[in-house]
Amino acid sequence: MVRIEKQDAVWTIIHSRFQEARNAMDPASADALVEAFKAFDSDKSASVAVLWGEGGAFCAGWDLKFASTLSNRDKFQRDVVEGLAFPTGANAAPRGPLGPTRLELSKPVIAAVEGPAVAGGMELALWCDIRVMAESAYFGVYCRRWGIPLLDGGSVRLARLVGQGRAMEIILTGRKVPASEALRIGMCEQVVELGGARVAAEAMARNIARFPQAAVRADRRSILETYGVPVREALRREWANGVEAHFEEGAAGAARFASGLGRHGDFERI
């Protein structure tokens, strides 16, 4: 259902329910994904994770066969709502309906999207820091047809990526958003050939993982913490995050540059 494949500091977390439901998420899968990402975040040897849906679909959303059993309000409260408290700090909430969508990790995650990432599957991809899509992959709020709202951060994160008006149109119409459009509007960061999303995402992850990680995590944290914050406060948070990383790694890195490494924009000899 969920397994982890590790290559040095890169973990690929694989969701495999394609034959059953095109990698739609049921409670067991959601719990397994949460545990996998918590393990990734707490492992000091791990730097970057890739999330990939096996079999040609990233995630078809919430398992509607399971959702159809939740017409009773008490059952919905018991099976879905209880335990899904809103987060108050890093990893405070056990999970969202789709799993890790309420976790606040300290390390980057890259979504490798093949085929559909629709409804909650789109929300799961939006939770990731970066999205790499195959040219045939697509997003869409396909749950619009069935009266199921977004519950895993889609209405929050999509507007932050593409703007309020465009997010409103995509969410309210539920239409398909192909990879080419997703790249153009900022909903994904790279489009690759069919079948190449995992390879490309892992290559990007390895590139990120080879840099000094304190600065990578500090800059990532600053981006996340300062969205929508007044400039003065945002600059204060950036400074606090950056100074800590400088004394952990930056001074040593500057010394490597002074010794002759990384000159003229060389990213190989660092």
Image: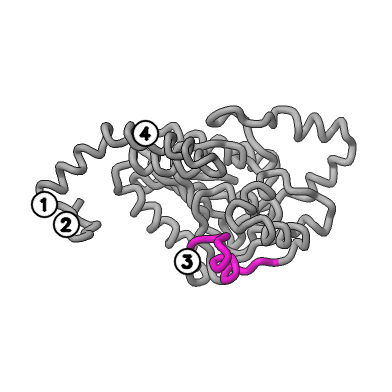
What residue sits right under mark 3 in the picture?
196
Label located before the other in sequence (2 or 3): 3
Could you tell me which residue is drawn at 62 percent across and 69 percent down? 178
> Mark 2 or mark 4: which comes first in sequence?
4
Under mark 1, the amino acid is Gly
> Which residue does the numbered mark 4 point to in the structure image?
44
What residue is shown with label 1? 260
Q: How far is the residue under mark 3 from the one under mark 1?
A: 37 Å
Is residue 49 highlighted in magenta?
Answer: no
Describe the element under mark 1 as helix, strand or loop.
loop
Magenta region, residue range: 176-189
Provide the secondary structure element on which disc 2 rests. Answer: helix
How far is mark 2 from mark 1, CA to CA? 6 Å
Q: Which residue is mark 2?
A: 263
Q: Position of residue 85 (x, y in %)?
A: 68, 29
Residue 244 is drawn in which quadrant?
A: top left
* Relative horizontal placement of residue 262, taking residue 67 as reference (left or right): left
User: Separation of disc 1 and disc 4 at Cα?
Assistant: 30 Å
Marks 2 and 4, how far apart at CA: 30 Å
Label 2 or label 3, whichever lies nearer to me, is 2
> What amino acid is at disc 3?
Gly
